Image (cartoon, rainbow, N blue to C red):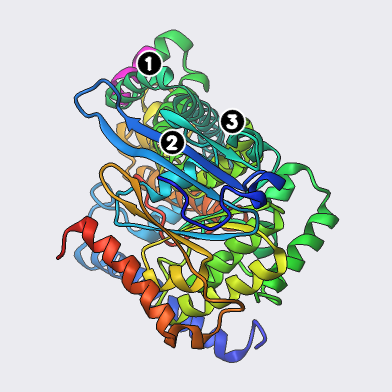
Amino acid sequence: MPVFSIRSIGRKALYYAPPVLSFVAFIIAWQLYVDLFGVSAFILPSPERIVRAGINLGPALWGHTWTTTYEILLGFLVGNAVAVGLAYLIVRWSVAERIVYPFLIVSQTVPKLAVAPLLVIWFGTGILPKVIVTALVCFFPTAVNVVQGLRSADPNAIDLVRLVTPSTSVIFRKVQFPSSIPYFFAGLKISMAAAVIGAIVAEWVGANSGLGYLILYGGTSMRTDLMFVGVGVTVILGMVLYGAVGLAEYLISWRRTDVRTNT
Amino acid sequence: MTDARPGADGAAQTAAHPAIRFQNIGLVYGRGTANEVEALKDVSFDVRPQEFVSILGPSGCGKSTLLRLVAGFLNPTSGSVSVGGVDPENARTNGLLGVVFQSPVLLQWRNVIENVGFLLELQGVPRRKRQETARHYIDLVGLGGFERHMPHQLSGGMQQRVSIARALAFGPSVLLMDEPFGALDALTRDRMAFDLLDIWKRDKKTVLFVTHSVQEAVFLSDVVIVMTARPGKVGLIRPIDLGRPRTKDHRLQMEFVEHCRVLLDELEADVGYH
């Protein structure tokens, strides 16, 4: 059957229609509520007003979006690189597990919003403290999932390798590492969702650009519509980035149905 | 325990080393602790080259442990194991040993041909040669045409065939099979038994086969060894003189039934049913 047959398009439309239509209905209801009841734009701006505020920002909005995207991506990259490295150490050496795990848990229990001002004192209002906060919230879900993934390797499969070679690095490359891939992506997805929040929160503490800064600015200058613009773009950005991780998973990872992961 | 088979200590044995020799094997877990468990006690028997030997026994009698000893994944507390006259570690690194587990243990991210060629790949066999060998054994286990399928697309029986093909492609002289058909339904299990005998006849391997099923053991084997539990000991070594090739008719013969009865008696004596 051709991919784009009328029937398959019809089926897809039927599948996606309910969520899309209900979203559209929600926006319309919002608009009508604001218009009919004359709600003040300060309390709740209408969708139309929010979109106009966004358009009026013009290139500045792109600037804010790009700043935040850059922080997220950089923090995501650094956090996950550290996570994978730590996970490897933890699985490889039991001493490393005892040393690293307490730090892992402390890093998660430390309130990020409280630490962010400290980071601003140390590293200024540039991009660095944002990247650090983002990396901090990113790495935990990935580390935990990769540790579990590396340990999910079938011991019999490891014995199988040992029929040929006792090399632990071969066992790692051929069995443990590939076994961990689905877990890795499960971790990455949670990590990406967390990264967006991390970057926004970090911007709140001290920044002069970024979507978090825009939301904060909107709040302090009584521009509720700007706050909504910031939140809206953040949501879209988060969805796009999350989708990108999902796409990477689809392209790279082998799929299994019986994988259980930490969420 | 002495080997009751005719000629076991005679001329046939002097010509070559036994394929596998267990000599007064003892295995104690957690020695010197409160949880000390004697898993195996004074286990001795030989498996001759190209012989099909099954080990029968209740759960926890150390059947699978015996296989791990042969593969050198485990060392006995006392006694010695040799494979073709060398110690297990040596035998293993020389590629003398193939293993089939109860579960297929396929690498989920590799297709059938890549799974079958996996051990050859680890040995550094070039890709083309490896694929050729893998194809041969995929055909042999009756999976021709499924080379590019992923493991999850195959039934349990087919997956186990892939794992048998993988063990064979490695070219071992000794095949260790740990309840390989244990997880399969009765019909599939039956077919696999026939196919395994075909392969065994063609490929001329020594097989050490662990199973729970008395009928399966008798049907497949030249010799069946009954283990008793706690500690695992050899209870009975029974040659199965049914003639080959084995067919469905063998199972209806009086001798077949008699073998089963004797083995079952030995098993039940240990468990204490009577």
Name the element at disc 1: helix
Q: CA distance from mark 1 to mark 3?
A: 22 Å
Q: Chain of mark 2?
A: B
Residue that appears at 16% across and 64% down: B273
Q: Chain of mark 3?
A: A
Q: Which residue is mark 2?
A: B24
Q: Find the residue positioned furthest to the left.
A: B274
> Any magenta on residue A90?
no
Name the element at disc 2: strand
Quarter residue A105 falls in: top left
Image quarter of the N terminus of chain B: top left
Residue that appears at 41% across and 14% down: A120
- Quick check: can you spot residue B171? yes
Residue that appears at 32% across and 27% down: A108
Q: Main secondary structure of the magenta part?
A: helix
Q: Chain of mark 1?
A: A
Q: Which residues, given as a range, are shown in magenta?
A: A112-118
Q: Which residue is mark 1?
A: A99
- Residue B94, label in figure: none
1 or 3: mark nearer the eye: 3
